[in-house]
Image: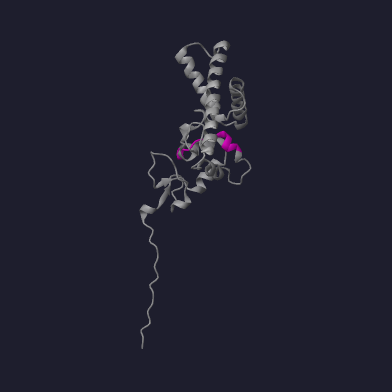
Amino acid sequence: MALATTKKATTKVVKDEDLTTCVLCGFIGKDGYFYKHRNSLLDQHFSLCKNCASREANESIEKTHEVLRLLNMPFIPELYKETEGKSNQFGHYLLLIGNPKKKYDNGKVYSELVYSDSPTHEEVTDVDSYIFANNEKLGELYSLFGTTWTKEELIAMNHELNEMVIQYGGSREDLAIRDLYSEIIQTKWLSKKAYNANDIKWRKVI
């Protein structure tokens, strides 16, 4: 007579080192209940649980800044604008700011940005006014370099303009100097674009 064999039920033991503690409510749980922070001053096993973070941040834009500072994540007004009307605005914002492929103006990918990468050291609480002012600045760059460039290219060209003023003298307030330097930069970038376009065509031929 064959002896019946029984399998022992196995349960996964969760170790203390696998758990995270919420610094606000004290809840202890698995990582999935928490937002992963970028704060080097906080141990990896401490963060804000999703409930606390969303409850606080969705209360007001000022509270959003408080939570982002604790998590050491940036406030990007344009991204925040995209989340308006969402049931969990803060949670949706963190999805956007966690993008590991999309790059911000400073060249970093969103998933590497920290609070100091926010576009201003002051809290942006009036998103519409900020975007309007930002677009106004973009319009100024269009007038300097033309409208055929991307935002990132315009920012890079504007940086070159500032460097030329420092290196060769003059002032951005001097219209003649500013127009001369802007034209030199634009010609340089157009030449580079034309060269790259021809290089691509040549590669396709061979």
- The front one of 192 and 139 is 192
Residue 125, how many percent across, how many down?
57, 32
Find the residue positioned furthest to the bottom.
Answer: 1
- The front one of 125 and 206 is 206
Q: Is residue 150 above or below residue 7?
A: above
Quarter the N terminus occupies: bottom left
Residue 101, how many percent across, how many down?
50, 41
Which color mode does the image show?
A: one colour
Find the residue positioned furthest to the front.
Answer: 206
Q: Is residue 191 above or below residue 206?
A: above
Q: Is residue 193 above or below residue 101?
A: above
Relative horizontal placement of residue 12, taking residue 51 as reference (left or right): left
Q: Is residue 171 above or below residue 45?
A: above
Q: Quadrant of residue 190?
A: top right
Does the magenta portion include 72?
yes
Q: Quadrant of residue 140?
A: top right
- The front one of 108 and 128 is 108
Does the magenta portion include 55?
no
- The front one of 179 and 74 is 179
Residue 62, how many percent across, how many down?
54, 35
Who's the residue at 58% across and 35% down the image? 78
| One can see residue 44 in this view | yes
How many numbered circles does the render carry?
0
Relative horizontal placement of residue 21, taking residue 92 as reference (left or right): left
Residue 4, how many percent across, how many down?
38, 82
Q: Which residues are magenta?
A: 70-81
| One can see residue 75 in this view | no
